[in-house]
Amino acid sequence: MSAENILVVDDDPIIGITFQRELNEEGYNVDSVVNGEEALKAVKLKKYCLVFIDKVMPGMDGIAVCRKIKEISPDSISIFMTGFLDKNNVIKEAEFIDAGGKVYYLYKPFSQGELLSVVQNALKEPNNN
Amino acid sequence: MKTKKVNTKRKITAAKKKKSAGKVNAASAGLVKLTDRLINSMQDGFAMADMKGIHIEANFALCQMTGFSHEELVGVEMPFPYWPPEEYESIQAAFQKTLKKGAGNFELTFMRKNGERFPAIVSTAPVKNSKGEIISYIATIKDITERKRVEMLLRESEERLKIAQRLAQVGSWQWIAATDTVKWSEELYRINGRDPNFFAPTYAEMASYYTPESWKRLSASVEKALRDGETYELELEMVRPDGTIRYTFARGEADYDASGKIVGLHGTVQDITERKQMEKVIIDAVTAKAVAEIERKRADEIEKAYKELQAVKEMLVQSEKLASIGELSAGIAHELNNPLTGILGITRYYLKHKSPDSREYSDLKEVAQAGERMAKVIKGLTNFSRPSEGEMQELNCNDVIEALLGFGQRIMFGENVIVQKNYGKDLPLVKGDINQLQQVIVNIIDNAIDAMQRKGSLKIFTRVVAVNQKRFVEMEFVDSGCGISEDNLKNIFSPFFTTKRPDKGVGLGLSVAYSIIKHHNGEILIESPPAGQAIGAAFKVRIPVAIS
């Protein structure tokens, strides 16, 4: 199992590129896709320990993507990024957790340090190994 | 005038001798003696003159009265010593009258020896002999000085009473039952508008002197006074002959005889028309003033209500505007955050791989800094559009402020701002997020310090207020700055509205404060006098009291 594979699902490609630039140097391999369908394809091809999912995307939404990934790759941890805490988000987060994902607060724009700590914390999760 | 002294003694003696030469007897001598005694015992003066005008007798009273001795008077020719020179004419006239008519009563002025004049009633009569020939004149003289004085006093006091009645507009009357006579004072005639030379009206006539209603009350009271001796006091409407109405205050009471029987009535009538009119004028004036006051108050209330309505309307417009701006801001923030995340992340990556001396490095540094600025703006917008839920706990507002001021007062205010804290005692707790509330306070204070150009005074108050039956803790911040213009006041909570220079702020501080306080179900208000007045602005933040 590769601990270093990370997938970023965000309709804005620049987020994927940023993850790559920030994490490649730290020894992580980052792939990025811009929608749910591409994410499922990628998960089928490669084993990812972490999948960062944007909350608002055209097409398949974050929760559906999370659910599908859980079916294809039960060991992958889906991470829901959120910067706010409001009513709508709380509901979404609850649904996301229901679908088998985790919620991390990552405020955009984030620094490299913030990103690294989220990644490291997620990888420490007991059910990861 | 020189008086001619005649030796009367000898003459009288001669006369006596003549008489005694006739049928002289003891009886007649005794009669003369008796007459002398009688004359001398008289209270009034007595004088006798013969046909030649010589004073042949003067009694003791006359001497006393005039101050002349018997010798100084008897035997003296006219004019007599007690005739004042200026009165000769009138005295002579009286004397002539006596000559013609035989007797008379005169009021004359005589003179005492010391020159003092005095009034006297003089009664004169001729003395005739048995043949009916006038042989002499006698006169009695009554000194009426005292009577005159009393008369004058009486006249004076009557005059005074009249004046008093006139001044008080009080007339008086008296009715004697036995003779059915009525007496009115002059003033009572005047009050009634009647001629004082006529008789006072009879009781029956009085009916036409009053309005029917007043007469009904008056006659009932008069009859009761006569029957039971009950005093009455009434306000009446009197009708004058010319038809004008006078308002009077009438008072009447019974008169009793020694046995306690009612024998008549007396009373007073006061003209209170002027007083009534004055009362009416005053009442009218007071009423008019009160009405004006009520109308003014009503107008004020309407204006106040209208202004409040306007304010509420403006607030509604404002909050709707702010809400829509909030939605927009949230959208913008979200849309900008993704690209910005990329810009910042990728820039940071390349900064690490470029030599700090290279041109690319310094350019990328600029990009990173610009990006950081953008991030700050977006963060502010985000906070405005949807402040995070935060950690709500029960707080004492005094502690919230004190923790903030204690932390960095010097840094926040600088050296030239005097802070006066007026904390309310025993403030109830509020539910809130301490970080967010402190952010609000920092934003308000920041604004105040800028308005004062970092020099002046900032007063902080905390208190409990009730608004629409809800209790709030109010924190008030009053600065001594330049104040806020009406136009600026309208936009003060709008995002990106700022009066500061571009490098000093983007105009989100108060917008964020507004949305945080809204989020706390509170209110944020600004009171400001027109800009330019050195009173500055007052910011009021109200947070609902926590219900425990």
Image: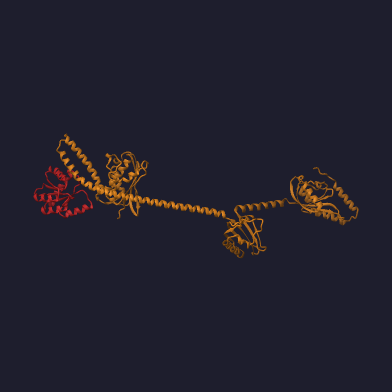
Question: Of residues B153 and B292, which is closer to you in this image?
Answer: B292
Q: How is the image coloured?
A: by chain
Using residue A114 as the reference point, say whether residue B266 is left or right of it: right
Residue at horizontal 63%, vertical 58%? Answer: B173
Direction bottom: furthest residue: B227
Using residue B291 as the reference point, say whether residue A107 is left or right of it: left
Colour red maps to chain: A
Using residue B371 as the reference point, say whether residue B30 is left or right of it: right
Direction top: furthest residue: B357
Q: Is residue B392 visible?
A: yes
Count the marks.
0
Residue B430 percent across, percent down from the top left: 30, 51
Residue B139 percent across, percent down from the top left: 80, 52
Residue at horizontal 26%, vertical 51%? Answer: B392
Residue B452 percent across, percent down from the top left: 33, 40
A22 w.r.t. B547: above or below: above
B450 w.r.t. A45: above or below: above
Q: Is residue B425 visible?
A: no
Question: Of residues A68 and B116, which is closer to you in this image?
Answer: A68
B311 w.r.t. B179: above or below: above
Colour orange maps to chain: B
Residue B393 percent across, percent down from the top left: 27, 51
